Image: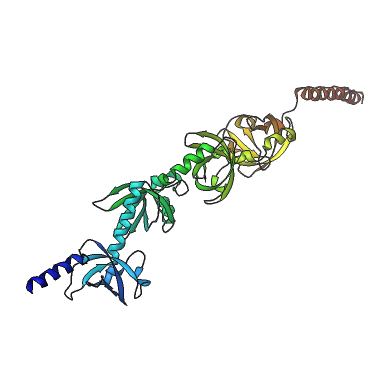
Amino acid sequence: MTNYASSIMDELLEDATDIKLPVPGFLVDGVVVAVMKNKVLVDLGGMATGIIAGQETQDSSDTIKTLKEGDTVSSYILEEENEDGLVVLSLRKASQQKTWNKFLSAHESGESITVSANEANKGGLLLNVDGIKGFIPVSQLAPLHYPRVNGADSAQILTRLQKLIGLPLLVKIINLDRESGKLILSERAAESEKRKGSLEKLDVGQKLLGKISGIVNFGIFVTFNGLEGLVHISEIAWGHVKDPNDYGKLGDEVEVLVIGKEKDKISLSMKRLVPDPWVDATKKYKVGTVVNGEVNRITPFGAFVKLDEEINGLIHISEIAPEGDGDPAETLNVGDKIKAKIIAIDPDDHRVGLSIKSLDEKPKKAKKDEEALEESDKASAEPEEAEEESDKDSE
């Protein structure tokens, strides 16, 4: 009888499904049997009951907020059994494990992923996903997000970076440290293929619509199709540009013309999309013409005069006063309304030469005629004076 019973038991054990006991450090699926304020009970296949409590209920997806009885949930095993005989489980660690597996897979395959930064410092953007820390250095930001500021001012850089917190960013993992669980991410790398394709299709002479991504003393940066180009200050407008900030702000849409392409360096122009006012200037202004203008800039070598919205003329220091030297600021002030004579026009170099002292200069022939007239008047006056003297003598 005993042998018979033993034989039956052996058969039952052979036919039975292997029983998998909870092992710490692994993920396990179970069915939710109760959801309380800060506690969840989970049935682990009828073999044990697990509990998720306290901070272990918190994960990046706020899973606990949507859980209800009967749902299947995946959790991480922390302990085989607590003092109440329950398996200690964690949603937080389960989410972290899944996230790490996702990052690991993306790193191995070179796949791009979407992340959001939690904070920023002057070196870049930081993120924390389920305890896994990532960093996007400033140098690895895409052109649209790169903080271009004058003088690399750290305070301005930080201000620009803080505006990126919470925004979805497409990145690639360029370095992964398994031991510390830290990542180095790159937005530039995620856009590299797109940039390469866009650059190949880009031609000099092409008109594009882009967005202003940076404004600095020497020009305006514009992004388009994953690329970034520079509108140098000399290519912003036909007239003198004092401050590029007067021609747009960050995020503005602008139309530009591609005027140069050398590897990743793209040169753009805004002014070449509008007619060159100097073409009409050669018709409107002629050498010898006296014009009215306003002094808008004074330099050690002369004064610039605004003739109209796009045309400025230069009065060289030698053409301001008869002496032809001295400091222009001693004679003229910015804002002065003046008259000047055009003494030279160079439409190719976009230059108009003006002169104030020429207004007082008279042609040599005219001067000689005046001198002759004065001598004639003087001669005609002498006989009259002689007659008056003769009359006096006779008396």
- In the picture as drawn, the residue positioned furthest to the left comes out as 2
Left or right placement of residue 173 versus residue 5 in this view: right
Judge whether 141 appears above or below 268 on screen: below
Q: Residue at x 51, y 37 (%)?
A: 200
Which corner quadrant holds the C terminus? Answer: top right
Which corner quadrant holds the N terminus? Answer: bottom left
Observer able to see residue 344: yes
Observer able to see residue 21: no
Residue 390 position, x and y percent, is 90, 23
Which of the 4 image quadrants contains residue 13? Answer: bottom left
Q: Residue at x 49, y 40 (%)?
A: 197
Residue 249 position, x and y percent, is 54, 51
Front-most of residues 270 and 364:
270
Front-most of residues 287 and 226:
226
Residue 191 position, x and y percent, is 44, 45
Front-most of residues 155 and 387:
155
Q: Residue at x 68, y 41 (%)?
A: 308
Q: Residue at x 74, y 30 (%)?
A: 288
Left or right placement of residue 258 versus residue 287 in this view: left
How many numbered callouts? Answer: 0
Left or right placement of residue 111 versus residue 1 in this view: right
Judge whether 97 appears above or below 241 on screen: below
Judge whether 395 appears above or below 203 on screen: above
Residue 66 position, x and y percent, is 38, 71
